[in-house]
């Protein structure tokens, strides 16, 4: 019997990898529900100041927003069956590294997706992951296998993120 999986999609927000993944998962009719961070960069940055009031110091303004975003992130990662952490071209996405560490601390399995060229820089993050992949087709194959038990070879990368 196929299990309904909740997958938290963390990381890079400057490409459409989430949309590509959702479309591929829907096409494959996999029992996957996605959650994730606020991907509207302005809303994510401004939420603390808009909701709780402006700050004179940039540090405290960012601090308020980070705390509000952490409520969402921690709640959704805690409820997830699996976390996918995507590192894009500018792999130094600190939020994604934090999310990987938080998932690991909770015992929530995570998969990392990044290009081969970032393998060395992300070796510690990769070392804790239960899988490391490079593109959406590989990730779909992972999700198919873990949610349905069906082993299907990834199709040639029609769409490669990264």
Image (cartoon, helix red, strand yellow):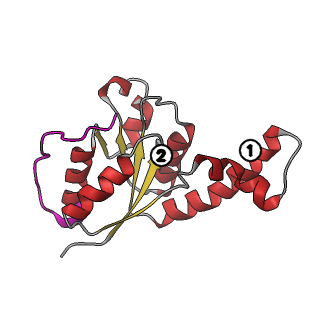
Q: Which residues are magenta?
A: 146-162
- Give me the C-alpha separation between circle 1 and circle 2: 21 Å
Residue 92 sits above or below residue 51 on the image: above
Number of the label disc, if any, that sits on residue 62: 1
Q: Is residue 119 visible?
A: yes
Q: Element under label 1?
A: helix
Q: Is residue 110 visible?
A: no
Where is residue 113 shown, x and y percent of the image?
A: 35, 40
Near-viewer residue (85 or 12): 12
Q: Is residue 118 left or right of residue 42?
A: left
Which of the 4 image quadrants contains residue 123? top left
Earlier-in-chain disc, 1 versus 2:
1
Q: Is residue 29 left or right of residue 50?
A: left
Where is residue 54 shown, x and y percent of the image?
A: 84, 51
Task: Identify the residue position indicated by label 2 in the image.
Answer: 100
The secondary structure that dominates the magenta segment is: loop
Q: Dots 1 and 2: beta carbons under 8 Å? A: no
């Amino acid at each position: 019997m196929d299990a309904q999986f909740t997958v938290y999609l963390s990381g890079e927000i400057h490409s459409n990898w989430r949309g590509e993944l959702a479309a591929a998962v829907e096409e494959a009719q996999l029992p996957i529900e996605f959650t994730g961070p606020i991907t509207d960069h302005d809303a994510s940055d401004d939420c603390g100041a808009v909701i709780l009031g402006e700050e004179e110091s940039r540090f405290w303004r960012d601090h308020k927003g980070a705390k509000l975003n952490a409520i969402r992130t921690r709640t959704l990662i805690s409820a997830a069956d699996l976390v996918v952490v995507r590192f894009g071209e500018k792999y130094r996405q600190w939020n994604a590294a934090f999310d990987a560490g938080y998932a690991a601390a909770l015992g929530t399995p995570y998969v990392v997706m990044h290009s081969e060229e970032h393998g060395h820089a992300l070796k510690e993050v990769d070392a804790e992951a239960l899988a490391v992949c490079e593109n959406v087709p590989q990730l779909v194959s992972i999700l198919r296998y873990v949610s349905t038990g069906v082993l299907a070879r990834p199709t040639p990368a029609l769409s490669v993120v990264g």
